[in-house]
Amino acid sequence: MAVSSPNPIHFIEDSLFCTGPLALSYSDPDQKWVIREHLISLFQDFPSLRPSTGFFTHNDGTEVKLLNATGELPVSQPAPPVPVTIWVPELYPQTPPVVYVNVECTRHPIYDHHPFVDSSGATVSSYLQNWRFPKCNLSDLVRSLIKLFSHNHPFQYSGPPSWTHPSMVPRMEAMDRVACMIHYDMAAIRAKNGEEIERFSALQSELKKRAESVEHVILELEEEKKELKGRIQKVCDESDRLLNWLKVLSAGFPIDEAFGGWDRKSEMIRECLAADLAVEDLMYALEKGVEEGVMSFEVYMKQVRILAREQFLHRAKMVKIGRGRF
């Protein structure tokens, strides 16, 4: 639990040079005088901040008792002030302070995807990342934070701020502004890429469904093709049997014994008519084979020419028989 005093200078001195169970985690006497000087200067420059002590837990779980400055940083109007806690680490000033925006002290949440403050309130900036002692101190740190939060308030809900050109501001502030611009550009690119990924994922899913449908249709067509081949083969076999039967009849089968009362002329007409119909059926079967894709058009035309010649001969023979010239 933090402890504070209404008199900042007395509180800092009492805390730094206290011994025993209440002693802080600063061991070097020279270090304590630097901390005293920096904190006194900070509270003189920024009266809205007050000193206090408390326990700070590092990422590795180590707990130390440190001094900190807590209060509100005034920023540009009409934006509200930013409540912060600035911890002075046990290796200060060789290591930079640790800055937190106090989320619990305000009803506003941290701005989503803020480039310098995460959802827990932990704050980073170019000044902290480029901390060098004795060039850097607590007062200048707070000044840089006020400029940073004035341009990019952690509790704003509007879009990214508009910046003046980085060449018109000091180096540290320019680095923060450039980092902020890059941050928002990257956020916009990530959002756009996310939309593209979702769109392509939906397209990929649709293409996958279509591919499955096409594969299903292809399998059905393959089955139909096999079935049609079997039917065509069956028709061809029946046509062959019919032609063989006609050849047997033409070789002198005693048709009069099977069909009594028929004369020679009727028998010949019947044979020619049967041969004509058989050729007609065979040509129809060949046409269906071309339609179903089991026979090429060139083969079909060749067979049709042969069958048409044979059909013409049968019909011509029937005409001669009918005229009594055969």
Image (tube, rainbow, N blue to C red):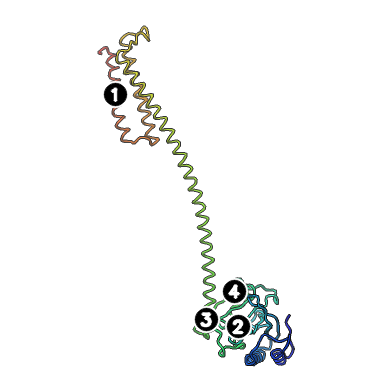
Q: Nearer the viewer, residue 235 or 170?
A: 235
Q: Is residue 10 among the parts visible in the rendering?
A: yes
Residue 149, percent from left and from top: 61, 80
Residue under the point 56% across and 85% down:
131
- Image quarter of residue 35: bottom right
Q: Nearer the viewer, mark 1 or mark 3?
A: 3
The residue that disc 1 covers is 310
Query: Which of the two labelled residues, at mark 2 and mark 1, occupies the earlier sequence position?
Result: 2
The residue that disc 2 covers is 145
User: If the image is split into quadrants, where does the N terminus sit?
Assistant: bottom right
Residue under the point 66% across and 72% down:
109
Q: Which residue type carries mark 1?
A: Glu
- Image quarter of residue 306: top left
Does dot 4 land on a helix, a strand or a loop?
A: loop
Q: Nearer the viewer, residue 149 or 326?
A: 149
The residue that disc 3 covers is 175
Q: Residue furthest front?
A: 20
Mark drawn on residue 114: 4
Query: Which of the two labelled residues, at mark 3 and mark 2, occupies the earlier sequence position?
Result: 2
Residue 144, percent from left and from top: 59, 84
